[in-house]
Image (spheres, coloured by chain):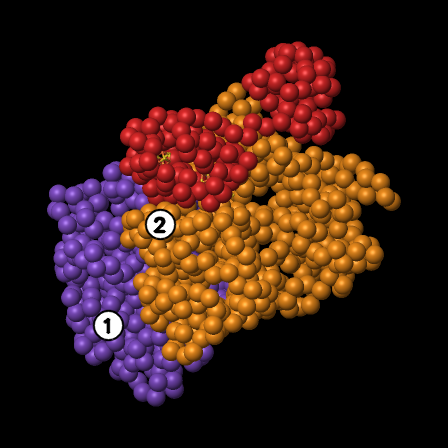
Amino acid sequence: MEARIESAICPGCACLCDDIDITVVDDRIYQAANICLWGASKFLAHKRFHPKKERRRLQQPRIKQGCLWQTVPYEAALKRTAEILTRASRPVIYGLTNSGSWAQEAALDLARSTRARLEPADLAFKAPYYRSLMKHGLFWASLDVIRDEADTVVFWGANPLHSCPRHVVRYSVFARGKFTERGLEERRLAAVDVYRTELAEFVKLFIRLEPGQEPALVQGLLAALTGGKPPAIRGLRRLAALLEEASYGVIFFGRGVSYGPAQELLDGLGELTARLNRGSPFIFFPLTADFNSTGLYHLLLRELGSPLAPDFGHDLAGTGQAEPVAWSEVDAVVVVGADLFWFLSQEEIDRLKKRQVPVVALSPFANRTTGHAEVVIPVALAGVETPEIAYRMDGLPLFLPKIVSTHLWSDSRVLRELTALL
Amino acid sequence: MGLVIQGGIVFDPSSNWDGEVRDLFIAHGRVVDHLTEVDEAIDARGLAVTPAALELRSPVAGYGQNFLRLWGGLPSPRELGESYALLGYTHIHEPDLTLPTANYVHRELAAIPLMDTSASLTLNLRDFDIFLKNKENLSEVAAAWAYLLEHCGGLTLRVAEPFVRYRQEFYQHRTISLEAVLDILDNILHILDSKISLEATPELLTAGLPSSGRFHLACLGPALVNPEALEKAHRLLAAGVSADMGLLPPAPRSQGSLVPLTIDQDRFAPCDLHGSPDPEAPRRALELALHCRQANLAFSAADLRQTPVSSFPQLFSWLCDHHSRRRFWGEDLAPCSYSLHDWLRSTRSLPAQHLGLPDRGHLRPGARADVSIYDLPTLSWWPQSFNRCRMLLKAGERVVDNYEIVNHTVSKATFYRRTGALPNHIIDGLYAKSSFRPGNLRVHPNPEIHWQKAP
Amino acid sequence: MPAVEEIQEFLPNLDCGRCGLTCAEFAGFLLTRELAPEDCPVLHEPDYAGFIEALHELLGQPTVQAAAGMQIDLEKCIGCGICVAMCEFHLGNCADARLGKGPRPQDKVIFHIVNGGAVVVHQERCTRLLQAAEKCSKCAEYCPTKAIVLF
Ligand code: SF4
Ligand code: SF4
Ligand code: SF4
Ligand code: SF4
């Protein structure tokens, strides 16, 4: 049985490319056209051409009995999770940036009812961004408008070719838009990073900084724009000129910025964009990688009035926490749509294990977290095996229909039934 | 299931009931002429029974509005829905929905409990400029708009910028003046046999409107930037143009700390949601509203930030009570105030008319049983008691009882206009330019949304 | 190149016929790459976890897809589609590619992205073949991973 599905949506990253043409044979995806390699590794649970990228799917829930794994039905895994959450006094629900909107809504309900903290996986990246917006304001547009209008594009600490590979083609660099009919030739491009990235292949002005030099560059740019005397950083003057001459500009910043002193840097970039905005439109745009991170912050902002991490245990819901959670206080973790143990330092992992903090992992794939978890609950691939809603990085939601079937539960179902159990 | 609201003092301006005592029969969610068998009776003796209110302009779901919450002070969707219900509303209308943002807007609206929702499809005339210039194309443009309206789940049409202008010099030849656009719009609306709402601006007030009665002037308040604008607005209203007030408070709150929040939706002028209006505009808006009580002028508030639903009681009191005006503004502003009849007309009958919902805003047989019931004190002045709805029925179901929400999950619908139009080459062109494939621009089969065709 | 026997070690050897063949025949088709390990439904059962990967390792990968005038190294290619958007031929023949969208199945293209890698479908449309080799090299020029080699 062969079926063709046109215009499917790839849940590989926040580009949410919606032009994926799929051939399904016997209820599994055999071929996907227009999908990038990054998306393929998520989309094609079974791939023909790049087997080394194939990730192992989890098939059945399992729980740890002593030091042995035991395969159990979903109900038993949920029951164990409920016990863990009832016993915990500082539970954290972590991740969710790679979950659909329905799962995120369910997780928010679960966090409320267990008085947990909800920790978005990319909080360290987004919290400073939102705080910078509060100080300096925001000019915002959809990616379509950016494609049509932006003649000046800066990538700051961002390598779209790794985090969202088709971004440059679809929206920011190569695509021809309404007022950018010649595409690449019509855009003035710059990139700022601490090491050379593939962007250097087509970005004319590539400024390579020493680690920690970023805030100095931002301050230097501000100085240059206001007629002051900037420090001597290679490329600074050219970048300042490029920004100043823009008739419509975007600064896409990536995760690179959260490795240094993020708040200082993002405040600076926010101020810089606000300053540039006095001349012509300038957009300060986070290059979100995880496919529905935008949906999560949108949900938090809408429901709680703050895009920061809500902490229902401290009665602070509504204001939200910008600082990453202190793992030393946490006594239970539910991980959804993220690989927690991949982000944590070895030291942090060791401490969690030493304190025997129970970890529950909901994941379609085996990863580091599932390897350490006390309860592992396999879930269907959102947007492939179960329908979901996801927000493109510019905040426009898309409906991702189901493409192939599975016996696995969706993460939203797991979370909802868990909330009902409690 | 038969329900009777017994002995209430019924006010319904569009039926010319001005405080007559009568029984209201309800079956299957609608008002009916008579019932032989009644299962339940609500004793409404001494209470004011009115049609439930409809909010004509509730910019809570537009693209970018959510960012306003970054600066705090805005209600959550749940608080929004409940505040509206407690004031006696059952329907809110988002003015700004576009082809790329349709899914966004409907999702935001779906998150607001209790309220029925609808939205205006805001047309960007720049998308159609080359077709607008040639009269022969207008019927195709009309067909394209009809298609888009249904396709995006919109209820009414709206234009925020009734002109075609470009920032880019090499596009200058595509400019179309405001006057020319009004003329073209009139033609298209004639083909569609439809109305459209235009965002009021000083420029538009000066230009005036074609007299076809197909135009609605939305949100007058912020457009009243000088006495001339006020004068023009007066004249338009006197000529019978339909409009809504766009009331706003005098000094925008916490002005100093506001940083810009600008959303670019591919229009000529990106919109600053934190923008501060002319300091005199609020007074002019109120003056205009007071003087034009009898005009075709519906109640509306300017925006989500300056006039959240929690400020409605204050806005109402300015309209209805000259004491409260004197207390707040230091003067009367106009010799007359809104009577209960005027107020009900501007919050019920006229909004329902503008939205094209014939079974709302009145209580004649056939109307949907959306009824708000208020205390009618004999001693104190009426406006105060109308800030708290004693009981609210939505399609015959009790939502508010004894001043409290009693049903948090009452069913809600999204109203859209079915036009049956098919996509044509203009639509194909729009799709081709979008970064989305057409199939994914379709409004989601979202299980959270209960679609309902507007009658 | 592994022998059929070696491959059979990683097949269920049930000869259940669900793939329409016997296991030995199946192994033969694996060698010629007309079938892939995933085509054996039995191997997807939990009991055989890891077998598919092992087979792939055994079989090795075709790294270079050769076509006259142009080679795409699938080891390097990340499927970003820059080449598709920048190709001189697509510019005039595929409106979607111009705008950065993926071409439709029916669109006239030289190559497109399949399963995360660039695949040539109509080499003969390439300007280099139609006119002269020095006329165009856009696809290779902008490829960020230098996966395209023109000759
Ligand atoms: S860019 Fe992102 S959404 Fe697009 S195909 Fe690649 S992984 Fe999928
Ligand atoms: S399905 Fe698998 S086990 Fe059965 S005959 Fe084919 S190769 Fe052998
Ligand atoms: S540009 Fe290079 S990396 Fe990108 S798809 Fe083409 S060949 Fe692959
Ligand atoms: S050489 Fe030119 S025409 Fe040929 S595939 Fe590359 S870009 Fe296209």
Q: Which chain is orange?
A: A
Q: In the rendering, at what x and y percent does residue B25 appear? A: 42, 52
Residue at the spot 76% in from the left edge and 47% down from the top edge = A372
* Disc 2, SS: helix
Subunit that carries the residue with mark 2:
A
As drawn, B268 above or below C125: below
| Disc 2 target residue | A184
Residue situated furthest bottom in the rendering: B330
| Disc 1 target residue | B292
* Disc 1, SS: loop
Q: Which chain is red?
A: C
Viewer-nearest residue: A235 or A393: A235
Query: Which of the 4 quarters of the picture holds residue B315?
Result: bottom left
Residue at the spot 15% in from the left edge and 53% down from the top edge = B184
Q: Colour of chain B?
A: purple
Q: In the rendering, at what x and y percent does residue A273 appear? A: 42, 68
Residue at the spot 29% in from the left edge and 72% down from the top edge = B221
